[in-house]
Amino acid sequence: MTNHETTDHGNNVFVFTEIITPKEGHAEDVLAVSKRSMEPLKGQPGLIQVMLTTSEKKAGEISTVTVWESKADFQNFMKSDAVADLLKSDDMKNIKGWMDDYQMLMSNLVEGWHG
């Protein structure tokens, strides 16, 4: 049996999730934009983890999950020049026309672990 070391990130962990359902024929376009949109996250203060997933059940559905040490860390990132530049980019202009549905979830982590 493998013993996994776990890390306690405190009681204020915040999770931001985006769920995108692309229009038919645009799943690869949306996935490519999602991958490029992850670049500004690298090295951000308070960022614990970022994940980009595709659904096994709903064809084309894409989710991005970011885990932060606190909601304040997430909010500071959202106010950053990196996000402002991203929001003005051609990628963001294009992706709006490629989505059938967009949902965002903001959650406080109750319990979890990773090893």
Image (spheres, rainbow, N blue to C red):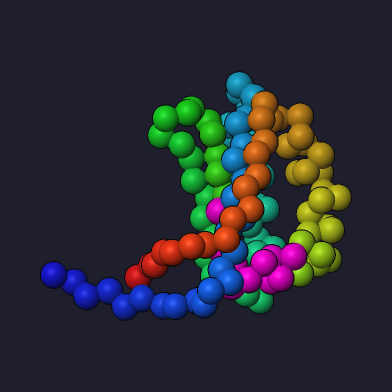
| Above or below 55: residue 51 | below
Left or right position of 92 against 105: right
Which residue appears at 59% of the width and 50% of the height? 17
Q: Is residue 71 magenta?
A: yes
Name the one closer to the observer, 7 or 94: 7
Left or right: residue 64 versus residue 7 is: right
Q: Residue 21, located in which quarter of the rendered image?
A: top right
Where, by quadrant of the figure, is residue 67 drawn? bottom right
Return the x and y of residue 8 as percentages of the image width and height. 44, 78
Q: Is residue 35 visible?
A: no
Residues shaded magenta: 65-75
Is 90 above or below relative to 16? above
Locate residue 30, reporting x and y percent: 64, 38
Location of residue 113 by image quarter: bottom left
Query: Considering depth in this image, is 23 or 105 the residue closer to the camera?
Result: 105
Q: Is residue 49 left or right of residue 44?
A: left
Percent x, y of residue 44: 66, 72
Position of the C terminus, as image quadrant, is bottom left
Q: Decide: is 79 above or below 59.
A: below
Left or right of 4 on screen, residue 63: right
Magenta includes 19? no
Name, please, the residue furthest toward the top.
24
Quarter of the image that includes the N terminus: bottom left
- In the rendered image, residue 98, in percent from the top left (x then y), is placed at 70, 30
Q: Nearer the viewer, residue 96 or 111?
A: 111
For the image, the number of numbered tags is 0
- Residue at 52 percent across and 77 percent down: it is 10
Name the residue: 55% across, 53% down: 65
